[in-house]
Image (tube, helix red, strand yellow):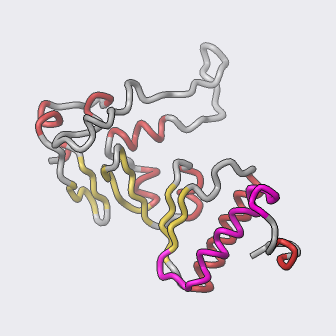
Amino acid sequence: MGIPSPEKRMHDYSFQMSGGMRQRVMIAMSLCLDPDILIADEPTTALDVTVQAQILDLLREMQDRVGASIIMITHDLGVVAEVSDKVAVMYAGRKVEEGSVEQILFNPQHPYTKALKGCIPHLQRTPASGRHRLHEIPGMVLGMAELGKDRCSFYERCPCGKPECMEHNPPAKAIDAGHEVACWLYS
């Protein structure tokens, strides 16, 4: 697992370990019961790039060794591109798009997925200002009272909103082999 002096670490408290060490310990603990599925919720958040790469390598190694599937929950599209085969994009607790990594990252169809991609920082500068322009998704996330209603949760922030969006939650529709989008633009 890449834990130096594991016999000494057995008696350490979590606050005595680095972030990467804590992640390694959690992965080791999760594999003790030989799971078929490992759920990794933000396993690389708040880790530096080198430690992130080590944790992702460790997850892949464990996946190969024990044959478990990994459900990775992350907001980091770089991590998604690195380790995923299939991607589900969620907004306000609902799946809005699902497909292969290539379909989602190179041919996103849902307005939220497109907006997410637009928020990724780029190294290119805008010609006019010479500055980096970081895009944002306008508006606010719905409050708890609004979530769960039978309508599109992204409607108020969506640049492509239609009247149907306020009336019903859109069903998922296959737009390509293995690529589904829940948006009234495709229904």
Q: How many marks?
A: 0
**The stretch drawn in magenta includes residue 30:** yes
Residue 28 percent coordinates (x, y): 67, 75
Q: 136 left or right of 25? A: left
Magenta segment main secondary structure: helix
Left or right of 170, for residue 8: right
Q: Which residue does the image show at 41% across and 62% down from the upper left?
A: 100
Q: Is residue 4 magenta?
A: no
Q: Is residue 127 above or below residue 41?
A: above
Residue displayed at 53% across by 57% down: 80
The x and y percentages for residue 24 are 71, 68
**Image quarter (top left, top right, bottom left or bottom right) of the N terminus:** bottom right
Q: Residue 34 in the image: x percent, y percent?
A: 55, 85
Q: Residue at coordinates 61% horizontally, 82% vertically from top-left?
A: 32
Q: Is residue 25 above or below residue 172?
A: below
Residues rendered magenta in the picture? 13-37
Residue at point 14% right, 47% down? 187
